[in-house]
Amino acid sequence: MKPLKNRPHVLVFDSGLGGLSVVNALIDGMLGVDVFHLADTAFFPYGEKPDEALILRVPAVILAGIEATSADLVVVACNTASTLALDAVRAQVEIPVVGVVPAIKPAAALTQTGTIGLLATPKTVTRPYTDQLIAAFGAGKTVLRHGAVGLAGAAETKLAGETPDPQIFEAAIQGLFDQKGGEAIDVIVLACTHYPLVQAELETLAPHPVTWVDSGAAIARRTADLLHDQMDQGVTALRTGLTTGGADKATRRVLKSFGFQTTQALDV
Ligand code: DGL
């Protein structure tokens, strides 16, 4: 049965639970919308998957999610998916699509030293889309990139209430600051939606204080702009957390404890 609606439905899509950092921003933004989260857990992590597979899978999973939730707008809350497949998604869905891509523009405005660290998945750091963002918004700045292996997984581990391997955080920080010129980094872009969920762990390891930038608040503003006519002021309600794949009971438990009223398995 499709969910009944009297407020706009926003579908937040990610490979896993990183979309929850964007849901947090929607809650902070006090958007009068109903939020559904879709985690493609059957195919997690995207950051280590071939592009050919992702470009087929991402639109298919999102279409199934829109159908299941009667969504009015979808947020592709995954930098790895957005930097590859936004055009493919937009070509196949009929509702507005908000992409989440590395926040180079605000980082360039914030840096005092002119050196920005870009922390993302191994796929996102190498994408032409990321090159274009840096060329367009990072002119005159030095952007040092690091593709972090296992960091999104560490965020999932933390959400599940377990202790992630501390070496994953150390490797992420060293991957940025140990590069030539890395000591000048004063702003770090968290260009994977999982990373704001482990910002505290990263912060304690940074050799000096830096400004951490993510896309959450900008995505909440963009969503509010697009739904302006349909939306009342008010609280953001968390409706259903959907997951692909059968063996992800733990993920659904996390979604429930995060505040989603129900959880549901989605067949793709
Ligand atoms: N949360 C995703 C992103 O923003 C990626 C995590 C993954 O590797 O699946 O890039």
Image: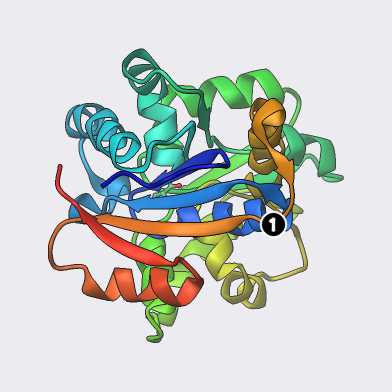
Residue reaching furthest to the right:
112
Q: Residues within 10 Å of mark 1 (few under 14, many from 20)?
A: some
Mark yes or no: residue 161 visible: yes
State the image coordinates of residue 36 (x, y, percent, origin top left): 44, 51
SS category of the residue bearing label 1:
loop
Residue 220 placement, left or right of 53: right
Residue 127 vertical placement versus 87 (above, below): below
State the residue in front, 10 or 153: 10
| Quarter of the figure with residue 177 | bottom right
State the residue in front, 79 or 159: 159
Residue 267 vertical placement versus 225 (above, below): below
Residue at image point 59% right, 24% down? 133
Kind of residue at badge 1: Val
Q: Quadrant of the C terminus?
A: top left
Residue 122 vertical placement versus 239 (above, below): above
State the image coordinates of residue 132 (x, y, percent, origin top left): 55, 20
State the residue in front, 165 or 232: 232
| Quarter of the figure with residue 246 | bottom left
Mark yes or no: residue 138 visible: no
State the image coordinates of residue 167 (x, y, percent, origin top left): 41, 77
Q: Give the residue pinned by disc 1.
A: 235
Residue 119 placement, left or right of 61: right
